[in-house]
Amino acid sequence: MSDVINPTQPKPPEAAVPLKPLGKVLAVTSGKGGVGKTFVSANLAAALAKLGQRVLVLDADLGLANLDVVLNLYPKITLHDVFTGKAKLEDAIIRAPGGFSVLLAGSGMVEYSRLTPEVRDDFLRIMSGLVPHYDIVLLDTGAGISDVVLFAVSLASEVIVVATPEPTSLTDAYATIKVLVGQQKRQNIRMVINQTARLGDGRAITVQLQQVLDRFVTTEPGRPLKLLHMGDIPADPTVRQAIMRRQLLMQSAPSCPAALAIAQLALKIEDAVIHRGA
């Protein structure tokens, strides 16, 4: 791991001081794109809904939104319409396959790719209107450490970082976690390792990543960083089939290894985030 992660990376851009996180909001983020973050968000939402939880997924990737593609939805009203005042918040919330609600963001929202005061205020207004009505709100953020991504994550009480065993993914996961610790003073960050080859790979990766962070990331005295391994999602050919068909894995193949792993992840999230915050 230490030969994969280079601790002498460029200093990330400064972000605004984070606000107090909202309760029962879980940000699903990643260091790089293509690691299955949106796949995890959508299928985790379906698994939580199956447990009887009221779930909403907000597509917080304002520039390159693709949650609608994963869910095979064609929304008439998007987050863009709510931001611009063309539609009410409740009109933009639609029911997704899998029994949960979604608030989709239309792709190519260039004007929302930077964290202006207007974008910040709009986002806060939307979140304040959503959180009281659901057991949990999942934020499917963009990848990386842009100011918009970091602001979205700052609104969450809990964070999941999705990574794969690939060196580039782990390097970017390290960089993302380093920023979350430095700027948002995060102490607990939950890890999900996607596309693992063998049972136990993800836990071993999380342990190694923890060791590198302990060595190279400075935390405040008495506030150590703890990575919480939430589970592995095994490499499974059924996943690609579901994605190509624009179907939720939890519906199309609920008994496949990857779906069973996501079901277990949902149980852990229900216990650690929803019930603990009740």
Image (cartoon, rainbow, N blue to C red):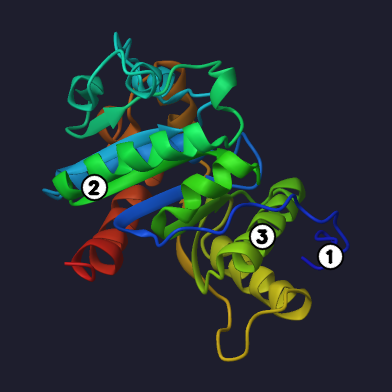
What is the three-letter code of the residue carrying label 2? Answer: Val
Residue position marked by numbered label 3 in the rendering: 179
Mark-to-mark CA distance, 1 and 3: 12 Å
Between 241 and 173, the one nearer to me in the picture: 173
The residue mark sitting in front, 1 or 3, is 3
Residue position marked by numbered label 1 in the rendering: 7
Question: Residue at 75% across / 54% down in the picture?
Answer: 171
Within the image, what quadrant is residue 201 found in?
Answer: bottom right
Give the image location of residue 232, x and y in percent. Answer: 48, 56
Residue position marked by numbered label 2 in the rendering: 131
Question: Residue at 74% across / 73% down in the picture?
Answer: 212
Mark-to-mark CA distance, 2 and 1: 37 Å
N-term-proximal mark, 1 vs 3: 1
Q: Secondary structure at mark 1?
A: loop
Relative to 234, 262 lies left or right: left
Give the image location of residue 210, x and y in percent. Answer: 64, 74
Residue extending farthest to the left is: 52
What is the three-letter code of the residue carrying label 1? Answer: Pro
What is the three-letter code of the residue carrying label 3? Answer: Val
Badge 1: few (under 14), some or many (20 or more) residues near its Cα, within 10 Å? some
